[in-house]
Image: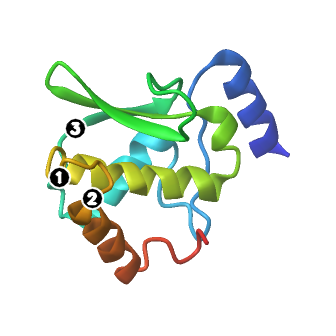
């Protein structure tokens, strides 16, 4: 009940909401989860990023990553990330974009695919699908 109220309040206020990982309470909120995933799966090699719920400049996407100046911005679109497992999956997806920024002509090309497979091999998605 508290999670539902927190989410509705976050939706109304347009702010990030805190949510637990499906299998633990290791992080609280998107920014903290980004830091956790950076530590667990990238040995803290990902650059700092502004991570929050919000609109994306690209229409009809669940999440997006873009540069603002020299800093990455990650946005998860609220209406497509209602389930915590979906939000976590999409945040992990976006970490691959950051890790391999401009590596391929296609944003979801071979380098990105290899990153997603590596995360799957590390069981990053184990409780998410």
User: What residue is drawn where x is 20% and y is 28%?
Assistant: 71
Q: Residue 109 got which mark?
A: 2
Q: Nearer the viewer, mark 2 or mark 3?
A: 2
Disc 1 + disc 3, Cβ < 8 Å: no
User: Element at badge 3?
Assistant: loop
Quarter assignment of residue 23: bottom right
User: What residue is drawn where x is 59% and y is 68%?
Assistant: 128
User: What residue is drawn where x is 14% and y is 25%?
Assistant: 70
How many neighbours does mark 3 have within 10 angstroms: few (below 14), some (14-19), or many (20 or more)? some
Placement of 77 over or under 37, stated as above or below: above
Q: Residue 104 got which mark?
A: 1
Q: Nearer the viewer, residue 25 or 84?
A: 84
Placement of 63 over or under 117, stated as above or below: above
User: Element at badge 2?
Assistant: loop
Q: Nearer the viewer, residue 74 or 39?
A: 74
Residue 46 screen position, x and y as percent: 19, 50
How many neighbours does mark 1 have within 10 angstroms: few (below 14), some (14-19), or many (20 or more)? few
CA–CA distance in space, label 2 to label 3: 23 Å
Tally the marks. Answer: 3
Residue 4 screen position, x and y as percent: 80, 41
Q: Which residue is mark 3?
A: 48
CA–CA distance in space, label 2 to label 1: 6 Å
CA–CA distance in space, label 1 to label 3: 22 Å
**What is the residue that sits farthest to the right in this orientation?**
1
First along the sequence among labels 2 and 3: 3
Residue 16 screen position, x and y as percent: 56, 30
Disc 2 + disc 1, Cβ < 8 Å: yes
């Amino acid at each position: 009940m508290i999670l539902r109220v927190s989410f509705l309040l976050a939706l109304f206020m347009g702010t990030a909401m805190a949510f637990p990982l499906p299998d633990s309470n290791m992080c609280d909120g998107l920014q903290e989860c980004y830091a956790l995933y950076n530590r667990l799966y990238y040995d803290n090699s990902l650059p700092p990023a502004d991570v929050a719920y919000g609109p994306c400049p690209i229409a009809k996407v669940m999440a997006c990553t873009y540069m603002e100046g020299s800093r990455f911005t990650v946005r998860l679109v609220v209406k497509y990330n209602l389930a915590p497992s979906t939000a976590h999956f999409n945040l992990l997806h976006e970490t691959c974009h950051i890790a391999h920024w401009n590596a391929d002509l296609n944003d979801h090309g071979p380098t990105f695919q290899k990153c997603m497979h590596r995360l799957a091999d590390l069981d990053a998605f184990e409780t998410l699908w």
